[in-house]
Image (cartoon, rainbow, N blue to C red):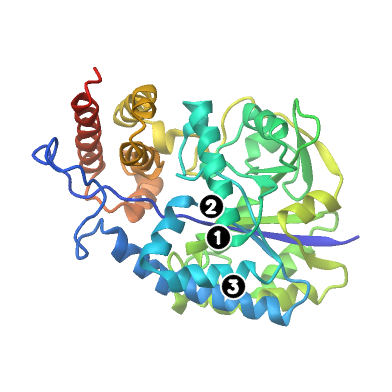
Amino acid sequence: MSKAIVLYLHVHQPYRIRHYTIFDTATNHDYFDAPYESRESNEQIIHKVAEKSYIPTNRHLIELLNENPDFKLSLSITGTVLEQLEKWSPEALQSFKDLVGTGRVEIVAETYHHSLAFFYSREEFETQVAMHREKVQQLFGQTPKVFRNTELAYNNDLAYWADKAGYKGILAEGWDKVLDWRSPNYVYRPAYTDNIRLLMKNYKLSDDIAFRFGNRNWEGWPLTADKFAHWLNADPNATNFDLFMDYETFGEHQWHDTGIFDFLKHLPKEWLKTPGNTFMTVSEALDSFEAKDHIDVPYTVTWADTERDLSAWLGNAMQGSAITSLYELQDKILGTGDLSLIEDWRRLQTSDHFYYMCTKWFNDGDIHAYFSPYETPYEAYINFVNAYHDVRFRLSEKGIEV
């Protein structure tokens, strides 16, 4: 029986809100273009991540695809990062085009603006999914067949929607409380659906690479490709090992000097040594293996923090009021037909803005602080609220009461 590694990597960068004060409100409508030397400069961050992660990772992946006919992978890439690569790092964008051009890389569908719109506005959610599909078709010539929601946020309602929308599969976190006694190393069928299949992240194996790889105090260190392949081969009944992680794992979260690129280089060879072992895209895994069981997820599960819920984005009053207030403007914003205003409103929906407002502490808090361009969650909130009030001002300028 064949066993497949299903490698899925996620590419995303938001439009971070610059230092935007109350004095900017009603006078300067530019929320996102920070000076290049500042912490929240989107251009500077794109250059840094492209040079440290995207370009070298794509170079290594193309080499692996050329050297190993059985090597394949899947990726998702948000509209917001594609726009920034087009503007500031065409070399990195071309490297993604070259990667997809090999014919063995599948692009996964998602929301254009990496938003939580599914939980606030089905209409806006579907608009962003359509925008993303068109962008992927335009740049890469693919039409996605498998869906993932922002931050792997998943529940029965989302699976039902994706089934009705015609997707063959959907991705989710293989969280213990959801799987119960089951293993994430199989294909499943979401509850209350007719056709769609479900792939669930093996978070333990994924996080060994994404979070623990460079930790010299981890009992598994150093993680070599042959050791990792041995761990996978130790499961005699598994069909698919779903390794889901951020693209920035390679070179940004795990720096080059940890050996992460050497690990990536040697993994296919070590895995393919064993007869029957292979790599599959998400679609190939869904097509190749029968569903092991139904999975019922009545509440929302994500891939973030120890709780694996939406609390990383909606766990405090600042976050809740900010996102609710933003979506309450939807009808008025869309009714203006002002494309610039609508786009600014959509960029403010990006989930990262609410993640930066998270006030959790201890281990999760350290992770939140690492990813944030702001000194504190309160600074993130103030910048967002000032931009939000300027959006309201722009509506009032058009004679729209808010």
Residue at 72% x, 43% y is: 169
Q: Amino acid at mark 3?
A: Asp
Q: Which residue is mark 2?
A: 135
Disc 2/disc 3 C-alpha distance (Å): 16 Å
Tell me, yes or no, if residue 227 can be seen here: yes
Count of labels in the image? 3
Q: Quadrant of residue 356?
A: top left
Q: Is residue 83 left or right of residue 149?
A: left
Give the percent coordinates (x, y) of residue 168.
75, 42
For the N terminus, the image quarter is bottom right
Q: Is residue 276 left or right of residue 212?
A: right
Q: Which residue is mark 3?
A: 98
Q: Amino acid at mark 2?
A: Lys
Q: Is residue 6 left or right of residue 235?
A: left
- Whether the residues at callouts 2 and 3 have beta carbons within 8 Å, the answer is no
- Whether the residues at callouts 1 and 2 have beta carbons within 8 Å, the answer is yes
Give the percent coordinates (x, y) of residue 377.
26, 42
Q: Is residue 354 left or right of residue 137?
A: left
For the C terminus, the image quarter is top left
Disc 3/disc 1 C-alpha distance (Å): 11 Å
- Check the image and name the residue furthest to the right: 1
Q: Quadrant of residue 173?
A: top right
Question: In this rendering, which labeled residue sits more in front, label 3 or label 1?
Answer: 1
| Upstream in sequence: badge 3 or badge 1 | 3
How packed mark 1 is, by other alpha carbons closer than 10 Å (few <14, some 14-19, many 20 or more), is few
Q: Nearer the viewer, residue 360 or 285?
A: 285
* 241 to 91, vertically: above or below: above
